[in-house]
Amino acid sequence: MMAYSGGDEFPCVVGEVGSYCTKMGFAGESYPRSYFRSTTAILRDTKQRNKITKRSHDFFTRPLGGVGGGGGGDLNDDNTHTSDSNVSGDADKGWEVCNPVESSTGLIYEGLSSSSRSTNLSSSSSPSPTTAQPSSPSPASMNANDDDDMNMSIDSPQQQSKSNTYEPLSGECYTHFLNHLSHGYETALSTDPSTTPLLLVERSYNPPPIRQKMVEQIFEEFNTPATFLARDAVCACYAVGRTTGTVIDVGYNGTVVTPVYDGYVETKGILRSPIGSRVMDEHIMYYLDALYKTKKARMKLKNTNYDYYMPLYQIRSKNHLPRREPFHTLARLDVARLCKEDGSGAGVASTGYVSLHDLVSGDGDEKTEPNDMYQQYAISPKTPYKLPDGTQVAIPQTKRFDVTELLFGKDGGCSAQIREEAVQKARDTLSSITPSDCESGSGGGDDDLNALAHLEEMRKRRRGIGGNSSGGKSSGSGSGPGSNNNKQQSAYFSHEKLVKACAPYFQSSIGELTSASIPAMFCNSVYKCDRDQQAQLLGNAILCGGGSCLSTSASSASSVDYKDGNAMPERIREEVESIIHMHTPQWRVKVSSPGLTERAVCSWLGASILGSLGSFHDMWITKAEYEEYGPSIVSRKCP
């Protein structure tokens, strides 16, 4: 059996498909070579809905063009579009927004589609009263989820009468998953996946059926010689040189706290919160709208009829017509994201900061005077920020810190209400993405789990028939188990069976959702583990994720000031110690975290270190092992 190892002589590819971005590169490198958004726009064939004709990874700054694919993104010499009709909803006619990662579960998963869904574009020329969703009259209140395939075609008020309602096909997320990996292979890596092993980073709470489905897709579609699935929390520990610790991952669709002990994930201690970077971007978008409206009224600006800041594509157009949803809201959220990453839109306050919401009672009467820290930040100079249209607004320091308090909860219950609503929405989604007859406790749970064993037995039987018979269906010298002739039968994990197998796991994962703040999540997660593990898990915390790349001042968000860039870990350390000191005085907590430039790719960096080790070659799942044992081998070799 051939062995594979990392390093310069036998490089392996390290990939991670996240809810916000996809990262791919070679093991041993300090940064991924391919880094692109996971949210993409797709254009389907007008006759065959399951056929995708075009894809676009850049649709935030200009329209994509209609079904014919023409002209939506073309600009004149004066940076205006060639046709004003192309700037409205017609410019994106037929295009959909997709993401392989489901927003509620955070996994590469998609529930079953109803039988009443449309099968082609021509049958959905008018919005259905049961599937069309009303659009908000105010563009500032639009809340389209770019990572949710189920809400993809909500038109703006100007185009509501011309809207088409599209919904994804069952199991199409794995098609997008393979396309993202192919895009990384082709653009930056320039390597053939059939000749290079793949080390894939997955979520720590990924259930076994989805893990087996991913391994099946990698081997059957890419024909890779070897692969390995690494848990993201374990890789984050490796990135900071540890094997034990509690990982706090602030991602795009939520925050996950995962205890890791001796290189293994303690699944019973995993806690998840739906508050992440996207919620912070929405919060920034709302108060940027309020600042822009105030600025417009004060300066008596008459260049636009809209009371919200316009994204770049809308400024380029002559009549400033908005695109249809969700493209319009996604473009506005991208501006809010840039404001946050610049440091102007969000910041981390020191311990002791109390938001103004905590100083006002429910009836509006003040309970106490603002503390000294709040007064210090309130009189501090405001942070200037220039919007895409050139309008410069001044962001107060307290507004910047209120965004981060969505994670810490020091705002008198204002963020607690947002977290409670988000958790309830996530729980409802988890209960609805699986069929009602597949729910645990209905008597069909054992049958759902036995379906995997039945499919495995059928797979071995088909491979045995294909390898022993000479009935004419297998031709050529490659008639063995590794032949490409078996690709027609590779879908032995049908999506219906996959949904049934995942139902018990998703029903039990509802208990992982919490509305607590990050310090409370950290302590609750550790206390769920064994008592002899709690001391090491409490004393070692690892902070990672793109949502944690925040600093105190706006100027240092893009600089190399380590002290200011370490504001988020220090705030978490002090908040956690204040909770632990209630029953264990003098306890010290160490929060390890890479710098701001590496914190967003911490899991990928740990996987890159893992794949470069010479002793890692024994851990690969080879093609021969997959053909002998099937996708269930992942549960034994990738714990």
Image (cartoon, rainbow, N blue to C red):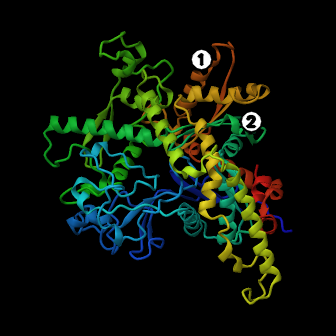
Side of 139 where 420 appears, left or right: right
Residue 558 in sight: no
Q: Where's residue 375, x and y in %?
A: 37, 16
Residue 38 in view in this figure: yes
Numbered circle sitting on residue 171: none
Most extreme residue toward the right is 1
Q: Which residue is mark 2?
A: 244
Q: Amino acid at mark 1?
A: Ser
**Camera-nearest residue between 92 and 109:** 109
Extreme-front residue of the structure: 443
Query: Where is mark 1, residue-wise?
Result: 578
Instruction: Look at 45% across and 62% down and name the residue there.
Output: 57
Q: Which type of secondary structure does the marked residue at label 2 adopt?
A: loop
* Earlier residue among tags 2 and 1: 2
Residue type at the position of mark 2: Thr
Asked whether, in this view, residue 133 is left or right of residue 529, the answer is left
Residue most extreme to the top:
368
Q: Quadrant of residue 510?
A: top right
Q: Position of residue 67 (x, y in %)?
A: 34, 72
Compared to residue 572, the image places residue 582 above or below, namely above
Q: Which quarter of the rendering shows the N terminus? A: bottom right
Q: Is residue 13 left or right of residue 433?
A: right
Instruction: Return the x and y of residue 113 as percentages of the image width and height.
Output: 49, 59
Taking the spot 65% from the left edge, 49% from the top edge, the residue there is: 206
Residue 438 lies, in percent from the top left, at 60, 51
SS assignment at label 1: helix
> How far apart are the two marked residues, 2 and 1, measured between alpha carbons?
22 Å
In the displayed structure, 583 sits above or below 296; it is above
Q: Quadrant of residue 268?
A: top right
Q: Is residue 203 above or below residue 479?
A: above
| Neighbour tally class for label 1: few under 14, some 14-19, many 20 plus, Cα within 10 Å | some
**Mark 2 residue crowding within 10 angstroms, few (<14) / some (14–19) / many (20+):** many
